[in-house]
């Protein structure tokens, strides 16, 4: 099984901050990685797939990078609507989610 | 506009079988571009993939749940279903159905659309 580890688990930041979340795979997954945003009581929302491709309609302040085992999601300038929990997910071999990173107001 | 709607009992007794159905509207369940999946999220916890089914009926299950999971599809009704047997309190979660889209011919598919989810509580 491929395990996904996100860091940090919680991130405190202010509006306008540049924020980076890291995701590590237990083995190489090439670029088969997606990022999702989830708000309380809501379904996850796809942000990025294939490591760096921005889903249609997602603001350009979100970006993704990485390949192999190391990946990151960056929000260039945090907006009030961005306070949420973010999950990475590999889809190289079956599907596995990271444990999530909660972005909270500092 | 694609819609996925989960339905089924909100309360299941321990040792019994949890059964849920997802109805797909506004899109084709038979397209070869998609898998259809079940995901769960225990209260306050993260997301866990349960299993997926392709339009041909081919299934893929989380190894940790494989012995208890069955997913089926009825393309005529535009529905796919989840059965999880021998449930315990640890199976209490919000269960969501979702679509997985293949971006190319590689077969790799990411989730692109989710239902709102339904809370299933396992309790006597």
Image (cartoon, rainbow, N blue to C red):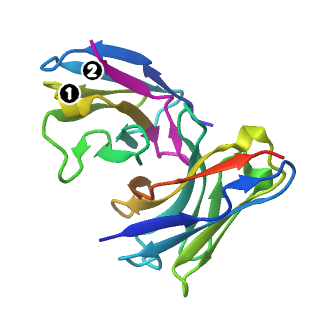
The answer to if A94 sits in the magenta stretch is: yes
Which residue is at the far right? B15
Q: Which mark is residue A20?
A: 2
Give x and y (percent) for residue A100: 45, 28
Q: Is residue B121 left or right of residue A32?
A: right
In this picture, is A38 found above or below B27?
A: above
| Residue A31 visible from this viewpoint | no
Q: Are marks 1 and 2 in contact (CB under 8 Å)?
A: yes
Chain letter behind tag 1: A
Give x and y (percent) for residue B66: 74, 51
Residue A63 vs residue B43, the one in the foreground: B43
Give the number of callouts.
Answer: 2
Residue A8 vs residue A5, the one in the foreground: A8
Q: Which mark is residue A75?
A: 1
State which quadrant residue A88 falls in.
top left
Magenta-drawn segment = A89-106
Give x and y (percent) for residue B47: 53, 39
Q: Is residue A15 left or right of residue B120?
A: left
How many neighbours does mark 2 have within 10 angstroms: few (below 14), some (14-19), or many (20 or more)?
some
């Amino acid at each position: 099984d491929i395990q996904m580890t996100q860091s940090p688990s919680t991130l405190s930041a202010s509006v306008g901050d540049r924020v980076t979340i890291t995701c590590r795979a237990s083995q190489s997954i090439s670029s088969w990685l997606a990022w999702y945003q989830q708000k309380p009581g809501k379904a996850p929302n796809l942000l990025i797939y294939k490591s760096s491709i921005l889903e249609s309609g997602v603001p350009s302040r979100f970006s993704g990078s990485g390949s192999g085992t190391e990946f990151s999601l960056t929000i260039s300038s945090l907006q009030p609507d961005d306070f949420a929990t973010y999950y990475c997910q590999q889809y190289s071999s079956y599907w596995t989610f990271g444990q999530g990173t909660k972005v909270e107001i500092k | 506009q694609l819609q996925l709607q989960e339905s089924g009992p909100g309360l299941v007794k321990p040792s019994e079988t949890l059964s849920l159905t997802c109805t797909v509207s506004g899109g084709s369940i038979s397209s070869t571009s998609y898998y259809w999946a079940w995901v769960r999220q225990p209260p306050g916890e993260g997301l866990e993939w349960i299993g997926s089914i392709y339009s041909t009926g081919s299934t893929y299950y989380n190894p940790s749940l494989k012995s208890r999971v069955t997913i089926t599809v009825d393309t005529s009704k535009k529905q796919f279903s989840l059965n999880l047997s021998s449930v315990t309190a640890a199976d209490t979660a919000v269960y969501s159905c979702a679509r997985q889209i293949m971006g190319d011919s590689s077969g790799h598919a990411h989730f692109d659309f989710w239902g709102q989810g339904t809370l299933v509580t396992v309790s006597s």
